[in-house]
Amino acid sequence: MVPTVAGAVILVSACFLIIYRCRVKVFAKFNVHPFDIDECNNEDMAFDAFVCCAWPDDALAQEVVGRLEGGKAEEGDRGGYRVCYHARDFPLGAVILRCIQQSIERSKRVICLLSDAFLRSEFCMLEFRTAWQWNIQHGRHRLIVVKCSGVDEALAAAERDAVAGVEDVRMFLSTYVYIEHGSDDWWQKLLYAMPINRLPAVDFDFHQQFFAGADYNDDQEVLLVDV
């Protein structure tokens, strides 16, 4: 009896381990998230994802935003996500620091397209560090880092130049899971990391109204403490 039970436990554990290791492939084929739950239930969120990148990577960012919002059926995209993209959606004349904080706090995911230009951008590094700090303080894993080609060399150069915050990026990459842009399954991994339940569709006036309606004053603290 005991060997039979032990064998069954081992078999079930092995099956779970196999499914866990193949969870992205399972998601791509069957559109299910094994082992995952919607951790954003009952939270007042405005966006499914906030996408941030440096200006030279705008083409990649627009591709990511377009596929998340519209999807490509032939490539298995689901589409229909409500996305905030800083270069497109932050209003002209807005207080950038406030927009960054609001976007991070009210988005289910923050997607950072990590590149050489990202490491050299003060605002991009601010977005990364603020999102990571939010994750740590709230015990969540909502920061998605897409690592572009050449980042390892760029990190070494940024460290030599003492670029502010680069040590945080190095620590993140050595501690958390990230996505290698250009790998065969990078897009499926990104989709898998997206929230299970999407927010209802809105028109683009929503983005402007969202930022215009921010209830901020100059005395409010902005979340910019070092992690």
Image: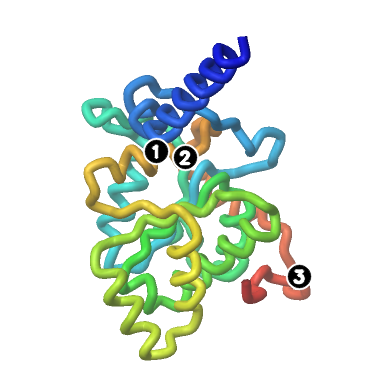
Q: Is residue 72 above or below residue 206?
A: above
Gap in Å between the C-alphas at discs 1 and 2?
5 Å
Amino acid under disc 1? Leu
Amino acid under disc 3? Gln
User: Would you name the residue on which mark 2 appears?
Assistant: 194
Amino acid under disc 2? Met
Residue lying at the far right in this picture: please name it: 219
Residue 108 drawn at (x, y percent): 57, 45
Residue lying at the far bottom in this picture: please name it: 161
Graded by Cα atoms within 10 Å as few (under 14), some (14 to 19) or many (20 or more), the crowding at tag 1 reads some
Observer-nearest of 197 and 142: 142
Residue contact at pointers 3 and 2, CB within 8 angstroms: no
Residue 88 drawn at (x, y percent): 41, 56
Residue lying at the far top in this picture: please name it: 1
Residue contact at pointers 1 and 2, CB within 8 angstroms: yes
User: Would you name the residue on which mark 1 appears?
Assistant: 191
Q: How many marks?
A: 3
Query: Is disc 3 placed on a helix, strand or loop?
Result: loop
Q: Quadrant of the N terminus?
A: top right
Q: Is residue 44 left or right of residue 130?
A: right
